[in-house]
Amino acid sequence: MFPFPRGKGLGVRLTTTLKTGRGIYAVESAAPIEHSADSIVLTLSVARADGIEKVAFRVKIAKSILPSPDDSPDKLIERIATWLEREFEQTREAALKTMRTEHLLLEISFDAEHPGPF
């Protein structure tokens, strides 16, 4: 079990964690995966272990760069986590700013031009 207090989906078994300068964060899928003809979209929730902060954003991945189009959300999250750990501060700030100013979730796109962790 991840050391989260109970409530609002917290306190459940989580498979992926990030070690950041701000502390330990858990990454989990916050919504069902969305499929289109050329991409998939994951909505991710990143929550600090002490429950003080939670940020959500969307990750759009072109199917053309996926090693296996049938990968589970957990496998995709594991791949994204390595990239997210490096880019955590920028991603966190951009996600918070987008939620505050536009009242939308930040969407990060990975494609042939910007493959990120793929």
Image (cartoon, rainbow, N blue to C red):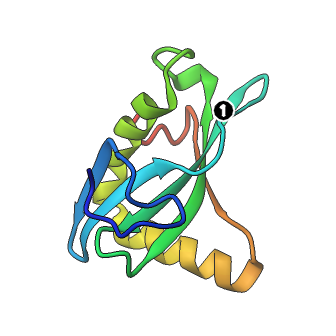
Residue 69, relative to residue 1: is it above or below?
A: above
Residue 91: % across, % down: 46, 66
The residue that appears at 55% across and 31% down in the rendered structure is: 112
Look at the image and tell me in which quarter the C terminus lies.
Answer: top left
Number of numbered labels in the structure image: 1
Residue placed farthest to the front in the image? Answer: 6
Camera-side residue: 41 or 26? 26
Camera-side residue: 51 or 75? 51
Image-quadrant location for residue 32: top right
Q: In this view, does 2 lie to the left or right of 31?
A: left
The residue that appears at 41% across and 66% down in the rendered structure is: 6
Q: In this view, does 48 lie to the left or right of 22?
A: right
Q: In this view, does 60 lie to the left or right of 12?
A: right
The residue that appears at 66% across and 77% down in the rendered structure is: 99
The residue that appears at 35% across and 57% down in the rendered structure is: 26
Residue 31, relative to residue 37: is it above or below?
A: below
- Classify 10 Å Cα crowding around label 1: few (below 14), some (14-19), many (20 and above): some
Q: Name the residue under label 1.
A: 40
Residue 42: % across, % down: 60, 42
Residue 58: % across, % down: 61, 53
Residue 77: % across, % down: 43, 40
Image-quadrant location for residue 16: top left
Secondary element at image label 1: strand
